[in-house]
Amino acid sequence: MTVAAVDAWHRLLEARGVPILRAPTDLPQWRHRTLFFRDPEDNIIELYAEY
């Protein structure tokens, strides 16, 4: 996944009313951009891209 894809997923999920736990955030120490949200079963899901 690319950094741009993480941002695109954020926009799509937010538009569909998915509960976002943490908007896209850069974690330079791991060179990741992360996005956390909840699925319909209340599980925490992380999407990330390495950069």
Image (cartoon, rainbow, N blue to C red):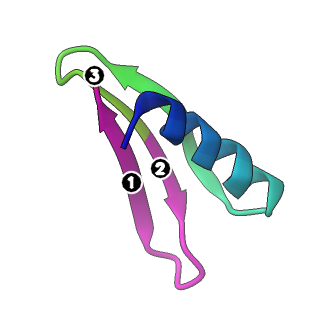
Judge whether 1 appears above or below 44 on screen.
Answer: above
- Which residue is label 3 attached to? 51
Mark 1 lies on residue: 46
If you read the primary sequence from the N terminus, does the residue marked by circle 3 or circle 1 appear first? 1
Q: What type is the residue that disc 3 sits on? A: Tyr
Q: Main secondary structure of the magenta part?
A: strand
Q: Secondary structure at mark 1?
A: strand
- For the point 71% across and 52% down, the residue is 12
First to last magenta residue range: 35-50
The answer to the question of whether label 2 and label 1 lie on touching residues, with beta carbons closer than 8 A, is yes
Q: Which residue is mark 2?
A: 36
Q: How many marks?
A: 3
Q: Is residue 15 above or below residue 51?
A: below
Kindly indicate the quadrant of the structure image that contains residue 19.
Answer: bottom right
Residue positioned 40% across, 37% down in the render: 34
Q: In front here: 39 or 3?
A: 3
Q: Give the label, 3 or 1, closer to the camera.
A: 3
**Of residues 32 and 41, which is closer to you in this image?**
32
Picture disc at residue 4: none
